[in-house]
């Protein structure tokens, strides 16, 4: 009886180890992005009544864009480097899109500040 229990326990352990081995590489591959890390952004206003430039740094983790002080920031980077994001702070709102390469990026943005609309381009450098 003891031998049957130990065989059953061994089969359960083997099952979980095999399952983990089969699933782990896929999960690890999805868990990182070639664009992960800090990126320094520069937003330049080309039209409208917004500030001439905005500078800040974001963090990309697993293809998702984060900033510690921007709770209403939503953004993703596709495996191809295509990026889309939106942010809202009080009465200001902006959306943008573009593309990242290994160490740089560029795109366009548009937004509003109260009743004023504005837009321009953005550039990115890996931090």
Image (spheres, grey):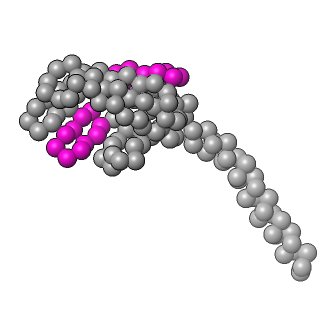
Say if residue 62 shows up in the picture: yes
**What is the chief secondary structure element of the magenta stretch?**
strand
- Say which residue appears at 14% left-offset and 24% top-offset: 48
Q: Is residue 97 magenta?
A: yes
The image shows residue 102 at horizontal and vertical percentages of 53, 22
- Say which residue appears at 24% left-offset and 44% top-offset: 89
Q: Nearer the viewer, residue 37 or 101?
A: 37
Say if residue 76 shows up in the picture: no
The image shows residue 33 at horizontal and vertical percentages of 54, 34
What span is in magenta? 86-108
Whether residue 64 sits left or right of residue 94 in the image: it is: right
Q: Nearer the viewer, residue 74 or 41?
A: 41
- Say which residue appears at 46% left-offset and 39% top-offset: 59
Whether residue 122 sits left or right of residue 23 in the image: it is: left
Q: The N terminus lies in which quarter of the figure?
A: bottom right
**7 above or below 41?**
below
The residue most toward the left is 115
Total numbered circles: 0
The image shows residue 106 at horizontal and vertical percentages of 38, 20
The residue most toward the right is 3
Q: Quadrant of residue 43?
A: top left
- Say which residue appears at 34% left-offset and 42% top-offset: 74
Whether residue 55 sits left or right of residue 1 in the image: it is: left
Whether residue 118 sits left or right of residue 126 in the image: it is: left
Q: Is residue 119 magenta?
A: no
The image shows residue 20 at horizontal and vertical percentages of 70, 52
């Amino acid at each position: 009886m003891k031998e049957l229990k130990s065989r059953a326990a061994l089969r359960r352990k083997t099952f979980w180890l095999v399952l983990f081995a089969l699933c782990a590489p896929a999960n690890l591959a999805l868990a990182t992005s070639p664009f992960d890390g800090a990126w320094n952004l520069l937003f330049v206003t080309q039209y409208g009544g917004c500030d001439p430039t905005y500078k800040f740094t974001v963090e990309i983790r697993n293809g998702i864009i984060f900033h510690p002080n921007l709770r209403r920031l939503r953004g993703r980077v596709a495996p191809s480097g295509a990026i889309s994001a939106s942010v809202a702070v009080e009465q200001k709102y902006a959306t943008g899109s573009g593309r990242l390469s290994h160490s740089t990026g560029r795109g366009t943005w548009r937004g509003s500040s109260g009743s004023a609309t504005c837009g321009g381009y953005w550039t990115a450098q890996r931090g």
